[in-house]
């Protein structure tokens, strides 16, 4: 069944697209579980094949911090007009019981697009005292065409393993990955290592720690 209208003339396909936008990088299984529905039902919502009822619309708005006006009608009171955005769940960070919401307007002032923001937890003491074990890290995903912004703290995949290190000498033959903890030796980074044994996921732009 192909349902083509929503309330005052909105498209079911457009509504599905907005639901897909709210899901972001979360898996369909994960998002459906948070909404208390089957992933196939969510797929039908996203594809415009089925319309969510009033209760489901309320769940979507509550979970993702958007207004019903934006979700149903695409009026300018939604995510891009100063609503909140539910941080995608990645790896060890668990957001089921307490969703982490960030203000899209504030993200815009920081020149950060929500689709490029990921979260990880710091593992180990290699970056102590700057970053502690278990701290939440916000990483700005590196686009393939972008050049390195310069020296700084980055999330890397080195030989397939994620590591957080300080990059020193970016773009030179003497580039190194350095731990702020002096107990750990520096890792030399040959120019041809980027894209082969070492992949730059992106710079760490913020971190959270308990006071």
Image (spheres, rainbow, N blue to C red):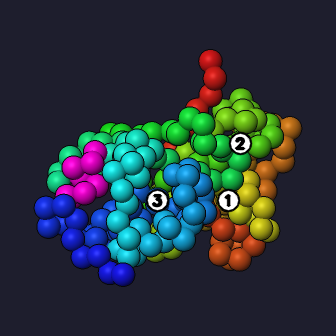
Q: Position of residue 195 (x, y in %)?
A: 65, 75
Q: Is residue 80 left or right of residue 209?
A: left
Q: Is residue 162 left or right of residue 101?
A: right
Q: Work out whether mark 3 precedes mark 2 in sequence or the reverse, and give the earlier one.
A: 3
Q: Nearer the viewer, residue 196 or 117?
A: 117
- CA gap, disc 3 and disc 2: 25 Å
Find the magenta span and give its range.
Answer: 67-74
Residue to which mark 2 is pinned:
122
Q: Position of residue 45 (x, y in %)?
A: 41, 68
Q: Position of residue 137 (x, y in %)?
A: 60, 42
Q: Is residue 68 magenta?
A: yes
Secondary structure at numbered mark 1: strand
Q: Residue at x 71, y 42 (%)?
A: 122
Q: Main secondary structure of the magenta part?
A: helix
Residue to which mark 1 is pinned:
156
Residue to which mark 3 is pinned:
23
Q: Nearer the viewer, residue 191 or 207?
A: 207
């Amino acid at each position: 069944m192909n349902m083509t209208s929503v309330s005052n003339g909105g498209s079911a396909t457009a509504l599905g697209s907005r639901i897909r936008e709210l899901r972001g990088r979360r898996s369909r299984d994960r998002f459906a579980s948070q909404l208390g529905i089957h992933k196939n039902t969510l797929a039908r919502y996203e594809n415009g094949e089925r319309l969510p009822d009033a209760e489901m619309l309320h769940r979507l708005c509550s979970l993702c911090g958007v207004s019903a006006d934006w979700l149903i009608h695409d009026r300018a009171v939604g995510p891009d007009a100063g609503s909140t955005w539910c941080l995608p769940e990645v790896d060890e960070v668990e957001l089921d019981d307490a969703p982490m919401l960030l203000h899209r307007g504030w993200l815009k002032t920081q020149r950060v697009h929500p689709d490029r923001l990921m979260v990880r937890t710091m593992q180990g003491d290699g970056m102590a005292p700057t970053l502690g074990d278990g701290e939440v890290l916000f990483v700005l995903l590196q686009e393939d065409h972008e050049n390195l912004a310069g020296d700084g703290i980055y999330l890397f995949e080195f030989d397939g393993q994620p590591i957080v290190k300080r990059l020193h000498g970016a773009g030179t033959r003497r580039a190194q990955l350095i731990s702020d903890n002096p107990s750990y030796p520096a890792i030399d980074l040959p120019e041809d290592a980027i894209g082969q044994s070492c992949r730059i996921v992106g710079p760490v732009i913020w971190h959270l720690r308990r006071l």
